[in-house]
């Protein structure tokens, strides 16, 4: 649907664990008739359309103002449906799906002919995911078609992790939002491609590299995408997932990182700015004397799943506040730290490396 000031987006609330059948059928009918439905997944909210309907897929790009060169992820209900969207599922891909599906794993596969071409932005491949969230699964099953769904945010902004975030970006531009409360992981799925015995990580995400590595059979390896430029992901733009206000990222972990962060914030205060910080519990002490300082709490860096789940909501909170400049500090690299650091790096307007 085309944006129109008088058009309002309909919102249906559901119980995220056991969504009412009537609500899901209602939303599935919108998908089948070519409409756009935002829905919760276990990672972030998705903006869904029938992946077989070229016009519906095109309207995802216009609603988000998304660059047509950035391909979408197609969501199916089970491994049995993979053949509807992918022409070949190599054994290593099947092994990963059997181990991690349903869940936050996306695999790039050769595209089947029925999938709308714009889903893949002109590539011969398609990214496929089997989500675990009961609302996402119910919607895909009830629609009876694969659902193309990028994150439900305006292009280049942070992903939406609640129905309120979806409306902030897309109210009046889409038909319906299913409000199932906050998304669980709060960070997108991990995107991989497969080449022979190698798994290439194209986008770090909610499924960690360590978990994937532990599931690989003998002889298979996990590689960074930089090892295979040919297998890069067109959507991995340098600056992405960004708040509207300029974010400075201090790329050193505590304790040096905390001191450096405090020094940068003190400098901004002296320059007359109102700083806002994505605050890790470990930095509370070093930032205590600085005022005025707006704080969006991420929780303890010792609990990375909490930090990941709050990251985008915290960026949006500071965007809505009267802070004029934003600050964050990088996390230790292991586990979910890789995905959070990746998003912070892409969100940052300015990066300060270890002194
Ligand atoms: O968790 C998620 O993955 C969420 C939920 C809604 O499932 N979706 C999501 O979609 O994050 P999106 O559109 O924001 O990110 C899709 C990214 C693209 O930017 C690109 O990096 C990669 O997935 N991708 C998609 N299709 C690809 C392809 N054919 N080849 C390589 N990379 C692809
Ligand atoms: Mg996105």
Image (cartoon, rainbow, N blue to C red):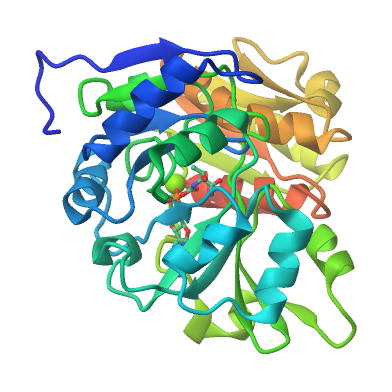
Residue at horizontal 79%, vertical 64%? 212
Report if residue 289 is visible in the image.
Answer: yes
The residue at 26%/18% (across/down) is 9
**What is the number of callouts on the image?**
0
Toward the viewer: 342 or 87?
87
Residue 345 vertical position relative to residue 30 in the rendered view, above or below: below
x, y (%) of residue 169?
Answer: 32, 27
Taking the image as shown, residue 9 lies to the left or right of residue 12, namely: left
Residue 293 pos. (x, y %): 61, 14
Which residue is depicted at the point 65% across and 49% down? 104
Q: Quadrant of residue 22?
A: top left
* 332 lies left or right of 310: right
Residue toward you, 42 or 157: 42
In the image, 300 versus 249, the foreground residue is: 300
Residue 240 located left or right of residue 32: right
* Quarter of the image where the C terminus is located: bottom right
Question: In the rendered view of the protein, which quadrant contains the N terminus?
Answer: top left
Nearer to me, 101 or 350 = 101
Considering only vertical position in the picture, is 142 above or below 130? above
Quadrant for residue 19, please give it: top right
**Residue 261 horizontal/vertical position (percent):** 70, 35
Using residue 128 as the reference point, say whether residue 42 is left or right of it.
right
Q: Position of residue 144 (x, y in %)?
A: 41, 44
Q: Is residue 166 visible?
A: no
Vertical side of 210 occupied by 267: above or below: above
Q: Residue at x 89, y 66 (%)?
A: 214
């Amino acid at each position: 649907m085309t944006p129109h000031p008088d058009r309002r987006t309909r919102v249906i609330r559901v119980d995220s664990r056991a969504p009412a059948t009537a609500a899901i059928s209602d939303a599935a009918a919108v998908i089948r008739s070519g409409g756009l439905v935002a829905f919760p997944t276990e990672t972030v909210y998705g903006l869904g359309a029938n992946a077989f309907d070229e016009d519906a897929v095109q309207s995802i790009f216009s609603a988000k103002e998304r660059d047509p060169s950035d391909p979408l992820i197609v969501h199916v209900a089970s491994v049995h449906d993979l053949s509807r969207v992918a022409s070949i599922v190599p054994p290593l891909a099947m092994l990963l799906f059997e181990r991690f599906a349903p869940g936050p794993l996306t695999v790039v596969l050769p595209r089947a002919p029925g999938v709308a071409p714009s889903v893949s932005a002109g590539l011969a491949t398609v990214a496929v995911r089997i989500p675990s969230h009961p609302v996402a699964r119910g919607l895909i099953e009830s629609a009876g078609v694969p659902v193309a769904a990028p994150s439900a945010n305006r292009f280049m902004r942070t992903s939406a992790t609640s129905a309120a975030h979806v409306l902030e970006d897309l109210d009046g531009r889409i038909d319906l939002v299913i409000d199932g409360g906050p998304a669980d992981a709060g960070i997108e799925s991990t995107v991989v491609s497969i080449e022979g015995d190698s798994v290439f990580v194209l986008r770090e995400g909610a499924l960690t590299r360590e978990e994937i590595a532990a599931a690989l059979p003998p002889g298979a390896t996990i590689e960074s995408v930089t090892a295979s430029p040919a297998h890069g992901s067109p959507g991995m733009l340098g600056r992405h997932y960004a708040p509207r206000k300029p974010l400075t990222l201090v790329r050193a972990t505590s304790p040096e990182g905390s001191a450096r962060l405090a020094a940068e914030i003190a400098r901004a205060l002296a320059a007359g700015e109102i700083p806002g910080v994505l605050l890790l519990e470990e930095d509370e002490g070093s930032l205590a004397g600085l005022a005025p300082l707006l704080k969006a709490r991420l929780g303890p860096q010792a609990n990375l799943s909490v930090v990941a789940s709050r990251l985008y909501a915290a960026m949006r909170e500071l965007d809505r506040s009267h802070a004029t400049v934003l600050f964050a500090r990088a996390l230790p690299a292991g586990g979910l730290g890789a995905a959070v650091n990746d998003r912070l790096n892409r969100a940052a307007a300015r990066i300060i490396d270890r002194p």
